[in-house]
Image: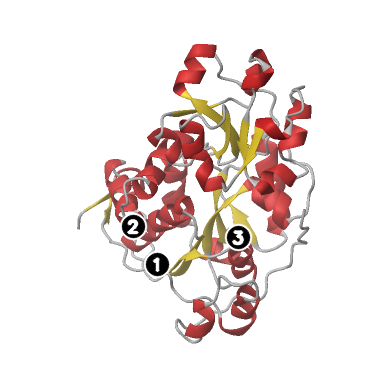
Amino acid sequence: MTRMIPIRSAPRRRWPVGRCPRLVQVLATALASVLLLTGCGLGTAGGFSPTGRLTGDVAGVDLSGASLDVGSKNFTEQIILGKIAVILMQSAGADVQDLTNVPGSNSVRQAMLQGQMDFQWEYTGTAWITYMGNDDPIIDVREQYEAVRDADAENGLAWLEPAELNNTYGFAVTRKTSEEHGITRLSQIDELPPSEQTYCIDAEFAARNDGFEPLLSHYGLDEAPEDRRRVMDLGAIYQATADGACTFGEVFTTDGRIPALDLVVLEDDEQYFPKYNVAPVLAEEVLDEHPQLTDLLTPLTERLDNETMSGLNARVDVGGEEPAAVAWDYLREEGLVADE
């Protein structure tokens, strides 16, 4: 596991957009994130996001005069959440630079530490294990959150309260399998005959020290020989599981393909997987300057859970909708924004 030691945040700087377009275009390469962060900053990646009028639980929040750089990683869930934040902050009157859709967790992390982003959504498990170099997750959701919150305070980053949304690893089965065998929990896998204990997993999970083999050991399951495991690209596992290529498919628990393919995620009833609860993360000095950001973001965070996020992800990954449109629709349906 790569160990990353937290770095104290550098003095905050505003980077002009478009100063280094060539570097922005090659951000996805291995060196790009380093060059980008040390050379010219992050270019916008987000495109247009609508602005409305704040309503309901966030009505009256005023960010007029605030200038905020809002970022996200480059997978569907992160882009949607980033767009939601952009829309809310714009609608509150802030001048928002949209830095969503940046390739790589480490790129976004360094942008936050170096003051090139003011806000992002981050996962407690990612911060604790990947950024802070810890090998063992903390099982209790609250204790895990408080541990990363307290550690990142030393880096000038403030974690607001986390959501119920927990985008961690999981194993899913078809609804037919779940109902026929009465399987809803990982601890019930051994109730199936060994010949039916087949797994679709990706290469990273197969090799991780908190991955597949330790999972079998944790749950007291038989070792899975080669003929009972199929290693494939993670994106292919969802359809392969739905098609019966294996009984148990490795998934991320908020992926939109889970409801779209009518898969059932088994409960991690012996708490093997780390907790990856998402939370708003801001530069402390930005939050100090604009404390009303807490009032803006908390009602949203309280609404986010796995079922909600899976549905939003599915609209993009399965339905082909634009993340900004999905974010706008969601905020209107929740009564947080309305047309101006």
Q: Which residue is mark 3?
A: 105
Locate the C terminus by quadrant.
bottom left
Q: Disc 2 residue type?
A: Ala
Q: Residue, x 71% and y 35% (percent of image)? A: 226
Can residue 6 be seen at all in this image of the molecule? yes
Count of all numbered marks drawn on residues in the image:
3
Q: Which mark is residue 324?
A: 2
CB atoms of marks 2 and 1 within 8 Å:
yes
Q: Disc 3 residue type?
A: Ser
Q: CA distance from mark 3 to mark 1?
A: 17 Å
Q: Which mark is residue 46?
A: 1
Query: Considering only order in the chain, which callout, 2 or 3, is on the residue closer to the N terminus?
Result: 3
Relative height, residue 205 to residue 191 (above, below): below
Residue 87 in the image: state x and y as whole percent: 35, 58
Q: Which mark is residue 134?
A: none
Query: Considering only order in the chain, which callout, 1 or 3, is on the residue closer to the N terminus?
Result: 1
Dot 3: element: helix
Q: Residue, x 67% and y 74% (percent of image)? A: 10
Q: Disc 1 residue type?
A: Gly
Relative height, residue 3 to residue 141 (above, below): below
CB atoms of marks 3 and 1 within 8 Å:
no
Observer-nearest residue: 259 or 173?
A: 173
Dot 2: element: helix
